[in-house]
Amino acid sequence: MSTSSDLHYLEMYELSRLIRTGRLSPVEVTEAQLARIDQLDGRLHSYARITPELALEQARQAERELARGECRSPLHGIPLAVKDLFHTAGVPTAAGMPIHRDFIPREDATVVARLREAGSVLLGKLQMTEGAFAIHHPDIVAPVNPWGADHWAGASSSGCGVATAAGLCYASLGSDTGGSIRFPCAANGLTGLKPTWGRVSRHGTFELAASLDHVGPITRSARDALFLLSTIAGHDPRDPTSLPSVCLEVPGIDDSFRGLRVGIDEAWLSDGVDPVIQEALQLVMAIIRDGGGSLLRVRMPDTRAVSGNWERHCGVQTAVAHAETYPRRAAEYGPALSRLIDGGREMSGMDYQRILLDAQRFSGELDCVLNEVDLLLAPVQPYAAPTHAQLANLAQDPEANRRLIQFTAPFNVSGHPCLSLPCGFTGDGLPLGCQFIAGKGAEALLCRAGMALQKVSTWHRVHPPGL
């Protein structure tokens, strides 16, 4: 494991200061990133498409503006990348689906437009699973986990996780419908924020399941996550479900646990959870106590129904999202996405209503728990990143699959925000992840807790070996 502070591993917040003070130029940083992508991504496969001409053009523009004293935002001149389901004007957006390989949007997704307006540099589009569901299309080479090629790189935002962990971008934008920001962060030693549903506009984002889809940042630190969220969040008239803007100022955050009440449900945290994860959570609990926070026993609402129903819940909405191409072009779909859509098309209205009622009940019960505490602590998943062989077996076992998503999918159903963080390593050096969950709208509180944890720990500063 390496704790290198090389240029490509700088946190975005640190890089911003160096660019704004003239110690680094956007062009030299962008050129270095493109060279590193060229050197490493042939074996990591994190990018679906690299945009070197656009990136250098944007970097030169940023450099000219900064030289004139015109700073658009703290992101000005910083090279980023986005998951390949965000529309990018003039750049193909395939969403991991060969049938969309030639789709070139005429306008940017709102989040991409906000990044452009902030003066950031777009390095390219990051690879993802087919349609943002669980598995990559058979014709696409899946991104490779830089911590171990035999291990899962995370779910649909896998390219985001690999590129950010390997120093091939300074941060990325992903999406999370059942855990697809948090799983890649846990697998790749990163920090990722699934905001409150509606906090970030979904306009111009390829849809998997509208009521479950969340857009958010994948970064190297909680500070960077808040840094990026502050740029992309806020109401968008083109997405009527988006929430009003809120003030998310990084310098004003108290990066300590003082006075924070963190809820712990010991039975829930040990339900099928590997000892190595439980031990990592105990370390996090000790840091919270030492930092002036308090640990309070709570009783979590039962997550079995919402996690067990998640695929069927998602499937109905995915069938609607794909109505123009499925079943008309079903032969061009991969088996996993086809199975999801077929299941959704076959479900009765009454069965779906029962799922919706379970979801409403869970969300209300969770609100009640979060009225008593500020945060909840949980794993991201019950074990470290599985091998590809283990993952294939999970796909054949509904109960095993439910266990995999039992700490992530329920909060997509409820819409509560979650922050995924590194919290240790296995004996073999694989990253482990935990998460904080908060009440709706409490992203700043989540990032405060993450910054407090990362102020006294170094897990987030360890990088994949050999890179």
Image: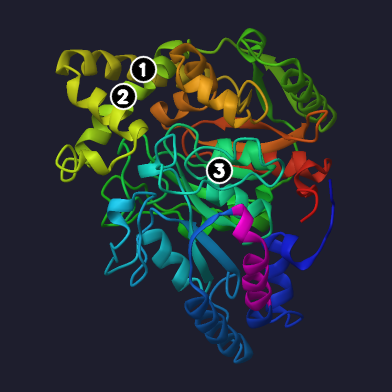
Between tags 1 and 3, which lies in front?
1
> Amino acid under label 2?
His
Would residue 241 appear left or right of 393 to someone viewing this image? left
**What segment carries the magenta color?**
29-44
- Along the horizontal axis of the image, is 262 left or right of 392? right
Residue count near mark 2 (Cα–Cα under 10 Å), binned few <14, some 14–19, many ≥20: many
CA gap, disc 2 and disc 1:
6 Å
The N terminus is located in which quarter?
Answer: top right
Residue type, label 3 = Leu
Badge 1, how many Cα within 10 Å: few under 14, some, many 20+?
A: many
Q: Secondary structure at mark 2?
A: helix
Whole-percent x and y of residue 288? 77, 29
| Residue 295 coordinates in the image, percent (x, y) | 72, 19
Check disc 1 and report the residue beneath it.
309
The dot on residue 193 is 3
Q: Nearer the viewer, mark 3 or mark 2?
A: 2
